[in-house]
Image: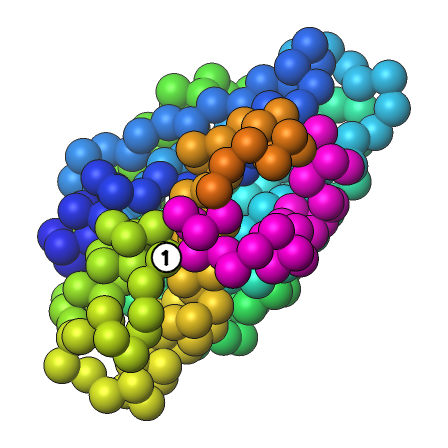
């Protein structure tokens, strides 16, 4: 699995919505133990630093990854969310403290032996998918622990989990993922994605390990790459070249932006 560490150099998923309500909320990303670098992008933490005046509609933007998350006041209700090809929203209470695990592409199905398409565009009770990890979260983690203690516990759990397994994966799939990230999702699947796999084989591997086909994965990666290089203000002002990111024209961009962000560029600003 060492090849996945190269992906981290060219793509880091993020959620632009976590930048909202800065006076009331705090978002942090914590790197895992270096031995987990091939498996986990980061642990993320999202919490209120003072009570919100009203609940928060938290808009989740697709990032190409599978995540586990849980609220520290209710760790028994841990959730796994699969690959998504459209935005979604979650209503958060006035006070909350969430922790999450953002997995590298292909890793969650590899660890838990599940077809990723079963999770696509869905939120699942983690206990139905990965009972061992769900029980660990329930029994070992709570709001009384410091963030550093939680991270140490997560590291120990996932090191034990990954060390106990012998992973086997077609590295041609990882080569394809790596190329998609390096090009920001802006490539021709037929002309540029030469992996030694047929298109049918590639779709089958992507569906199982990612949760969708290569074309949709490219669309999400392209949008993530765009968001990381452009502020919402710049987007609203249309001050960029659509062709640089593989969009045919403004209407094509706005349509995809609305699907993946949940609002038009001007509404987002």
Identify the residue at horizontal 65%, vertical 51% (top origin).
254
Tell me, yes or no, whether the highlighted magenta stretch contains residue 74: no
Q: Which of the 4 quarters of the picture holds residue 259?
A: bottom right
Magenta stretch: helix, strand or loop mostly: helix
Over which residues does the magenta segment extend?
242-269
Whether residue 60 is visible, yes or no, is yes
Residue lying farthest right? 54
* Relative image position of residue 137 (x, y in whole percent): 49, 43
Percent position of residue 71, x then y: 62, 36
**Quick check: 106 above or below 205?**
above
Query: Does 214 sit above or below residue 20?
Result: below
**Where in the figure is residue 54, as x and y percent of width and height?**
87, 24
Q: What SS does tag 1 mark? A: loop
Where is residue 175, by image quadrant?
Answer: bottom left
Which residue is labeled 1 in the image?
A: 185
Q: Nearer the viewer, residue 186 or 67?
A: 186
In the rendering, at what x and y percent does residue 76 appear? 61, 46
Quarter placement of the C terminus: top right
Which one is nearer the viewer's eye here, 158 or 249? 249
- Residue at figure coordinates x 57%, y 28% from the top left: 234
Q: Is residue 21 above or below residue 264?
A: above
């Amino acid at each position: 699995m060492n090849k996945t560490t190269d992906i981290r150099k060219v793509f880091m998923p993020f959620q632009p919505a976590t930048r909202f309500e800065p006076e009331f909320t705090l978002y942090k990303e914590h790197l895992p133990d270096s031995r987990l670098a091939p498996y986990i992008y980061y642990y993320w933490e999202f919490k209120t630093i003072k009570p919100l005046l009203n609940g928060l509609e938290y808009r989740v933007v697709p990032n190409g990854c599978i995540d586990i998350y849980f609220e520290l006041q209710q760790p028994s209700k841990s959730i796994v969310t699969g690959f998504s090809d459209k935005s979604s929203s979650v209503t958060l209470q006035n006070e909350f403290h969430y922790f999450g695990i953002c997995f590298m592409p292909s890793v969650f199905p590899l660890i838990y032996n599940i077809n990723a398409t079963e999770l696509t565009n869905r939120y699942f009770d983690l206990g139905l998918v990965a009972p061992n990890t769900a029980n660990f979260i329930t029994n070992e983690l709570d709001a009384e622990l410091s963030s550093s203690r939680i991270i140490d516990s997560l590291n120990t759990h996932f090191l034990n989990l990954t060390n106990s397994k012998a992973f086997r994966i077609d590295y041609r799939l990882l080569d394809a993922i790596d190329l998609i990230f390096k090009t920001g999702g802006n490539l021709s699947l037929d002309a540029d994605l030469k992996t030694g796999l047929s298109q049918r084989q590639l779709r089958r591997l992507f569906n199982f390990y990612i949760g969708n086909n290569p074309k949709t994965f490219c669309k999400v990666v392209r949008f993530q790459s765009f968001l990381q290089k452009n502020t919402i203000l710049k987007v609203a002002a249309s001050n960029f070249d659509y062709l640089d990111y593989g969009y045919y024209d403004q209407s094509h961009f706005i349509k995809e932006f609305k699907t993946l962000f949940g609002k038009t560029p001007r509404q987002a600003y």
